Each structure stands twice: as C-alpha cells, then as structure tokens.
Amino acid sequence: MAPRTASRGGEGSPRDAGSSRLVVALVRGFRGLRGHVRVELLTDRPEDRFTVGARLFPEGTDEGLTIAEASPVADGRGWWLRFREIGDRTLAEERLRDRYLEIEDPHEPREPGRWLFHELLGVAVTSLEGDALGEVVEIYRAGGAEVFVVRGPRGEFDVPGVRGIVAELAPERGVMIVDLDRLALDARPVDDEDYVRPRDRRPRKQPKKRPGTPGTSAPAAASVEAAPAPPAPPSPPTPDRDA
C-alpha cells in the first residue's frame, strides 16, 4: 500500500470529485502461462465491472485492456481476469504487478446514503463528548470492513467503521462521531517512522510513491469505487461498500 504519511495509493490517492475514472481492482497475483491475474476487489459490483469485453485501465495510463475472461476465485477472495492485449504471464507481470485497475466513471445514480471514498476525506471527527479528534485523511479495508485513518491533535489513529465505534457518519455535513470508550485508541505521532499500519504490512514487490492527496489510500489517478454507508436509524451507522 501507499506510504503512511505520503500520498496515497489503494489504496493510492483517490481522484478528486471531478475524476473521470474509478478504481475497481488491485492486481495481487498471477496464474498459469496465459496471463491470468488475480485482483483484489475495490468494488461491490464485480459482476457488472468485470464482464467479458469490458475495458479496464492500469492506473495513470490510457492503455485500455479488454477483459477476455473473468471469474471469482474459487478458493479465496478476489477475481481472476485475463485480458486480450496480454497473452502471457511474463507480459502480465511486467505490465500489471501491483497495479490498480480503473474504469471510466459510469456516472450511475447512487442510493441515498452511499458515498465514494474521496467524499469522506476531510470529514471532521469528534468524540461523543464533542472533543475534536482530527479529520479523515485516508480509508483502507481490513477484514472486510473499512477503516478510517484520522489525523489530529492526538496524532494519527485508525477508526474501524463498525457499529458501536462510529456513532454517526454524515459526510454531507462533514461530521463523524466516534465512541472513544469503545475505541482502543493507539494514536501515533504522524512522524513516527516505526509505526506500520496493518494494511501496510502486506509485502509489495514494487513499492512506489504516488502523487496525490496527502495521507489517502487509492491511486492518485482515480477514486476508489466502493464506499461506506450508514445503516438505517436508530442503529448507529456501519460503513458498507458500494458504488
């Protein structure tokens, strides 16, 4: 993943609100000799996004790739994809290792209460008592749930997007309220180079710095398609993925 305090990637930095692309996948592995790649899903609609004939773009490029095969991973998470323009494993590894894959923004209507990641960046975070804790600077996934990275007077810390911790999430008002009593707060100074978040511990063979919004976590060239959403009241909101 991207550096903790630099700009993002994948979790790279999401594109701004005027972006023309959305990130839908991250290449995580390879299979066989024909160029199959295993992708981590960054969309909740893989059946729609990964249809045969659909076009994906490696982050930051205009080199469209046409899906020739697509299927869910049978014994794990993610999907297997193969592209018409990439005919063997060597080429797949050279062009796609650790790359984010984007689609052209379809500008589809969204359900009320659903947001893209970039719409949550900068949201002010407070405690139930009204204490200012900082703002959301990054979002990443861990264990199937979104995690909000908050930076403020206490340093930088993670807020799991789950019931009981996030008491209110209202990005249209620029507000997130968290229950500190239920949060095992592990704030670290933003310049603490010894601190490695769980999502940064996964090895990347070709780490690289990505230009973009400081502290974010999807490619600088695009907005991550999935987004948290609150449940219906009166239950406290639990982020969910959607696009």
Image (cartoon, helix red, strand yellow):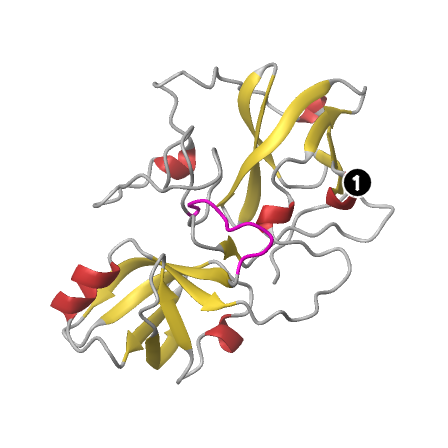
Residue 235 position (above or below residue 53): above
Residue 133 position (above or below residue 100): above
Residue 72 visible in the shown view: no
Secondary structure under tag 1 reads helix
Per the picture, the main secondary structure of the magenta-coloured stretch is: loop
Which image quadrant: the N terminus? top left
Whole-percent x, y for residue 130 in the image: 80, 20
Picture residue at 18% right of the left edge, 61% below the top: 93
Q: Is residue 12 magenta?
A: yes
Picture residue at 62% right of the left edge, 69% below the top: 107
Whole-percent x, y for residue 153 in the image: 61, 14
Whole-percent x, y for residue 71 in the image: 39, 76
Residue 116 position (above or below residue 124): below
Tell me the kind of residue under disc 1: Arg
**Mark 1 Cα shell of 10 Å, populated few (<14), some (14-19), many (≥20):** few
Picture residue at 24% right of the left edge, 57% below the top: 97
Residue 81 position (above or below residue 216): below
Extreme residue in the right direction: 234
Residue 147 visible in the shown view: yes
Q: Is residue 1 left or right of residue 127?
A: left
Picture residue at 70% right of the left edge, 69% below the top: 109
Whole-percent x, y for residue 7 in the image: 42, 36
Q: Is residue 181 left or right of residue 106?
A: right
Residue on which the image places disc 1: 173
Q: Is residue 62 magenta?
A: no
Magenta-highlighted residues: 10-19
Which image quadrant: the C terminus? bottom right
